[in-house]
Each structure stands twice: as C-alpha cells, then as structure tokens.
C-alpha cells in the first residue's frame, strides 16, 4: 500500500488512515503537521482493489466501525475522529 511520510519529530510510529475528501481527516493531518510530528498517512479512498482491501483490514483492526480518520500511535493506541486533546495527550504535546 502506498504510504506517504511527513517528516518531523519522531514520537514512534504514527499512522493516519484518511479519506481524501474528509474534512476531519484534513484537520487531523494539519494538526500533526502543526505539532511537528513525523507521521505516515494513506488516503484509503484513492487505493484500488487488494491495496484498498488491505488498508481497510488495517483500519478495522483498530476501529471496527471502519470510520475516518483513524490515527494509530505506537502500534498500541488508536484515536477515532478528530480529537485534538486526545491526540496531543497521546503524543505528549
């Protein structure tokens, strides 16, 4: 699956599963950028076939409802939706 990387301060693996048309996804991505956090992201709706199926399996592992944005921090915590306070707390900012 083609994942894009944004450089910043390394707080461990941070992965954002997003939709290209989702306003809350865009706000989550912008918040991470403003905080200067290194993270990876993928626009699941722009994937096709098996890549999209694989991405949705990853999303549903952390978020059984399959909604967006789904943010996974350090392969141990997921934050569903745009929750600025929770994101800042989880990243220690």
Image: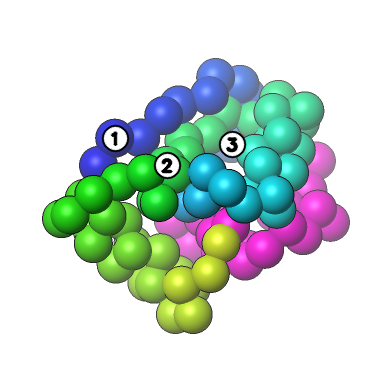
Q: Secondary structure at mark 3?
A: loop
Return the residue nearer the eye: 93 or 1: 1
Marks 2 and 1, how far apart at CA: 7 Å
Residue 61 found in image quarter? bottom left
Residue drawn at point x = 44 percent, y = 44 percent: 43
Q: Does the magenta run of residues contain 63?
A: no
Residue at the top extreme of this rendering = 7
Residue 21 locus on image (x, y percent): 58, 48
Residue 83 locus on image (x, y percent): 77, 60
Residue at the left extreme of this rendering = 50
Q: Is residue 76 visible?
A: yes
Q: Is residue 80 left or right of residue 89?
A: left
Residue drawn at point x = 39 percent, y = 72 percent: 60
Residue holding disc 3: 11
Q: Secondary structure at mark 1?
A: loop
Residue drawn at point x = 25 percent, y = 42 percent: 1
Residue 32 found in image quarter? top right
Residue 23 locus on image (x, y percent): 70, 49
**Callout 1 crowding tier (Cα within 10 Å): few <14, some 14–19, many ≥20:** few
**Callout 3 crowding tier (Cα within 10 Å): few <14, some 14–19, many ≥20:** some
Marks 1 and 3, how far apart at CA: 21 Å
Q: Does the magenta run of residues contain 82?
A: yes
Q: Is residue 73 visible?
A: no
Return the residue nearer the eye: 31 or 77: 31
Residue 88, compared with residue 2, is above or below; it is below
Tell me, yes or no, whether the two marked residues, 2 and 1, touch with CB atoms within 8 Å.
yes
In this picture, which residue range is highlighted in magenta? 69-93
- Of circles 2 and 3, which is in front? 2
Query: Which disc number belongs to residue 92?
Result: none
Residue holding disc 2: 42
């Amino acid at each position: 699956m083609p994942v894009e990387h944004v450089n910043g301060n390394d707080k461990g693996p941070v992965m954002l599963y997003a939709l290209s048309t989702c306003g809350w996804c865009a706000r989550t991505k912008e918040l991470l950028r403003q905080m200067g956090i290194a993270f990876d992201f993928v626009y699941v709706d722009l994937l096709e076939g098996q890549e999209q199926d694989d991405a949705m399996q990853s999303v549903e592992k952390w978020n059984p409802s399959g909604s967006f944005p789904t943010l996974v921090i350090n392969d141990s915590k997921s934050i569903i939706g745009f929750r600025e306070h929770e994101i800042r707390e989880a990243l220690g900012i």
